[in-house]
Amino acid sequence: MRRYGRLLVSLALLGLVAVTIDPRDVVTVLQRLPVWSLIAALALSVPQVVLSALRWRYTAQRLGLPLDTGESVIAYYRATLVNQLMPGGVMGDVERAWRSRHPEARASAAAHSVVIERLSGQMALLLTIAALVAVAPPFAFPGPQLGGQWLWGVALILVVVLLAGRYLPGIRNYSALLRRDVRAALITWPAPVIQLGLSTAVVVTYFATLALLDAGIASHVLTLEKLALHACLLLSMVLPVSIAGWGVREGVAAALWPLAGFPASEGVALSIAYGVVILVGSLPGLIPGPGRRPRSA
């Protein structure tokens, strides 16, 4: 039963959103989403996966694990699709690590390559959100009284929960071998520049996808405040409490869009459209590819 806890959380939160916001309003907003916006957003899923796969390939190679580009892209598509569908939310990454094992590399290299690759991406996302706070401080936001303060209050709470729930337990069990791998893949030159460049490019595709969808359904033009709201949606999806962010993402949109002076239905519609685009964009993971047979070290 425990393994389906995230599924129950997603269903419960989606039900709560449906009770608090008229689903017909959300459907009305979704109906004005133009085809060009969907196609462009789906097209962005390709560089998003490819850049993520290249980041994983680079990380693996820094740890002495041979991994070619085609193999990494196929495995990343498959892992993304599995993570979108499975209750655990990490089975795709587990399978990705298992298939990337190589007899000439130590056994832990495959698992560490996946963990560190994910860490690189989440660090870039947090840095991007921090930059948005610096560029667009809460007092510069328009909207209802205290709207900006509440917006960033919730965002900061999400950051604290993310760090406490996802990183602190790992720090307590931080082995010397993992420390060495983090140093090799993230800290030793030129890894910081390459990792930051690839991860920043991936984060840009996240924001560009949301911006394209928002441009098609929103009644307001894209502003720094909107980018801040998009950042909150992305951050909420990282919290390991639901399946692929479903429910949490929509709940955050329903709560934050009105505080910033925008219709809640537009925020929920955007979050649903984004979830669908990510799911459809991962469907190439169904295509079988010539992957290397897994072999133990």
Image (cartoon, rainbow, N blue to C red):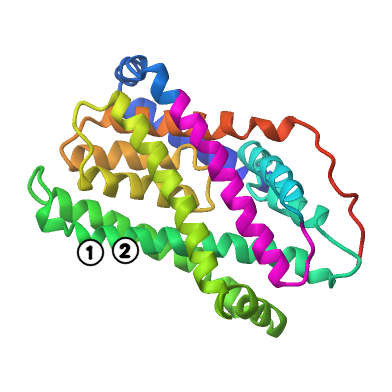
- The foreground one among 232 and 187 is 187
Q: How many marks overall?
A: 2
| Mark 2 vs 1: CB contact within 8 A | yes
Q: Secondary structure at mark 2?
A: helix
Which residue, given by chain and number where applicable, does mark 2 sit on? 130
Q: Name the quadrant containing residue 139.
A: bottom left
Q: Which residues are magenta?
A: 39-67
Which residue is at a point 48% across and 65% down the rendered structure image? 196
Return the x and y of residue 251 as percentages of the image width and height: 37, 39
Q: Is residue 63 above or below residue 88?
A: below
- Tell me, for residue 134, which label it has, or none: 1
Q: Secondary structure at mark 1?
A: helix
Main structural element of the magenta stretch: helix, strand or loop? Answer: helix
Disc 2 residue type?
Ala
Q: Name the quadrant containing residue 279.
A: top right
Disc 1 residue type?
Ala
Residue 157 part of the magenta-drawn span: no
- The foreground one among 140 and 25 is 140
Q: Give the quarter of the figure containing the N terminus.
A: top right
Return the x and y of residue 128 as percentages of the image width and height: 36, 59
Return the x and y of residue 86 as percentages of the image width and height: 67, 40
Which residue is at a point 54% across and 53% down the rendered structure image? 240
- What crowding class fits label 2: few (fewer than 14 Cα within 10 Å), some (14-19), or many (20 or more)? some
Q: Is residue 121 above or below residue 1?
A: below
Q: Name the quadrant containing residue 155.
A: bottom left
Residue 56 part of the magenta-drawn span: yes
Looking at the image, can residue 89 be seen?
yes
- What crowding class fits label 1: few (fewer than 14 Cα within 10 Å), some (14-19), or many (20 or more)? few
Which residue is at a point 61% across and 38% down the rendered structure image? 84
Looking at the image, can residue 250 be seen?
no
In the drawing, does residue 116 fall left or right of residue 153? right
